[in-house]
Image (spheres, rainbow, N blue to C red):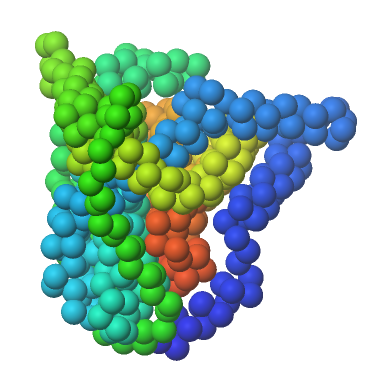
Amino acid sequence: MTRFTDKFTSFYKRLLPSPFSIAILLTLLTFILALIFTRPTGEGIGSYSVDLLKSWEEGLWKTGGGGLYFAFQMMLMLVLGHILAISSPASKVIDALTLPCKDTASSAFVVTIATIAVSLFNWGLGLIFGAILARKIGEKFNRENKPLNYALIGAAAYSGLMVWHGGLSGSAPIKAADENNLHDLVAKMDVDLASVPTRIDMGETVFSTMNIVVSLVLIIVLPLLMRAIGKKEKPHQKLPSPVMVEEEVIEKHKGAEKLDHSRIFSLTIGIVILFYAFHKAVIQPEKLSLSFLTPNFINFVLLGLGLMLHLSITKYVKAANDAISGATGILLQFPLYFGILGIMIGSGLIIDISDWFVSISTKETFSIFTFFSAGLVNVFVPSGGGQWVVQGPVIISAAQELGVSYPKAIMALSYGDQLTNMIQPFWALPLLGITGLKARDILPYTLILFLAGIVIFLSGLIIF
């Protein structure tokens, strides 16, 4: 196993540039593919190139559900989660989880199973939780001067992004459960709306027998797989230096400065934010829904908890200064990927890709081809919500035409979308920022998770 990962590490170091360079190269590749395959007959290359650039710009600066708006959401999630995790109470909880970690194998097992469990609840919390836990383990082994394969632990912390879309925060299942979402989605498609349900309950998708079995297999097999790799891998990565906790110096503050250091003020503001967040999100008229689990809700909760646990505005701001440097990659790269999405939507390239998979499908193979097409699209557009908006109409329309189960088609898209996160380092940016690792460090191991996932997800789609 060591030879295998050493070869892939060497391969990635030679051929894999930085994540920002990857985003630029994917932008250029998408532009060229759209220019070659979607240019209308009779339209000049120059004029169509300008049209594609306009689509790219619209996606890049989009302020709705993607682009700058989404980039800022994710930056806040990373920074607020990091602030919370380095508070004294949260650090003690995470430190307790490091107690069973005696070597690389046990550490990889603990991080994988804990990250997957949290990510099945919510992908954002799982990503930040896993990253902080991985760093804490690295700091522990550094303090104790013990060897550790830190890159493997980082990869284990990223494993949650391989299961999230089949969990409670999965974009496609949540959206499909909204009343009239499916009808709105296929309104411009040639479908019989009478035979399309207005909504599909999460009991038929996330809580279906197929998905429950697949999720159980993932939460059992993946930690054991990472543990087995940890037993064979040699520890050779540089470990992160432990964060020095400064002793609190008691000072006397005067005037308005007292407010910045007031425990009561910080605690009160935090409680008010949490109360409002849960009141607005959870207490809903007429029905209970899990749709409140959005990035905005998570950020609201992280903000309130952070203010409560740091117990002063001054400490909170200082923690923010320590955490914000890890958000650089998101600031630069998130808009670029929504620029790619803009090109794919504006040119119709994403529909062409999906349509091609549909054209070669039968009732028996449709779910499998949907799985692979979703995985391919996710490499170019790593956003589950965005993918549902642009690929969902084609999948629902084709499922109706072929007589395929709508819930199974939705889960096939979800599985494909989440699987290729293991070979697309986009969502690893927050983790890399917190752990200090590079994409090429973790990708040899996430590739192994990717291969295992292909077997597990395809088996679920074929058997059920």
Classify residue 235 by image quadrant. bottom left
Q: Residue at x 14, y 11 (%)?
A: 285
Q: Residue at x 16, y 40 (%)?
A: 207
Classify residue 168 by image quadrant. top left
The reply, left or right, for residue 238 in relation to residue 197 is: right
x and y, in percent, of residue 225 in the image? 26, 73
Whether residue 112 is situated above or below residue 371 in the rendered picture:
below
Q: Residue at x 76, y 39 (%)?
A: 35
Which residue is more in the foreground, 240 or 377? 240
Q: Is residue 80 visible?
A: yes
x and y, in percent, of residue 226 in the image? 28, 73
x and y, in percent, of residue 224 in the image? 21, 72
Which residue is more in the foreground, 314 or 200? 314
Which residue is more in the foreground, 54 or 402? 54
Q: Residue at x 40, y 56 (%)?
A: 434
- Report how many numbered discs are placed on residues in the image: 0
x and y, in percent, of residue 4 in the image? 45, 84
Whether residue 179 is situated above or below residue 300 in the rendered picture:
above
Q: Quadrant of the N terminus?
A: bottom left
The reply, left or right, for residue 241 in relation to residue 265 is: right
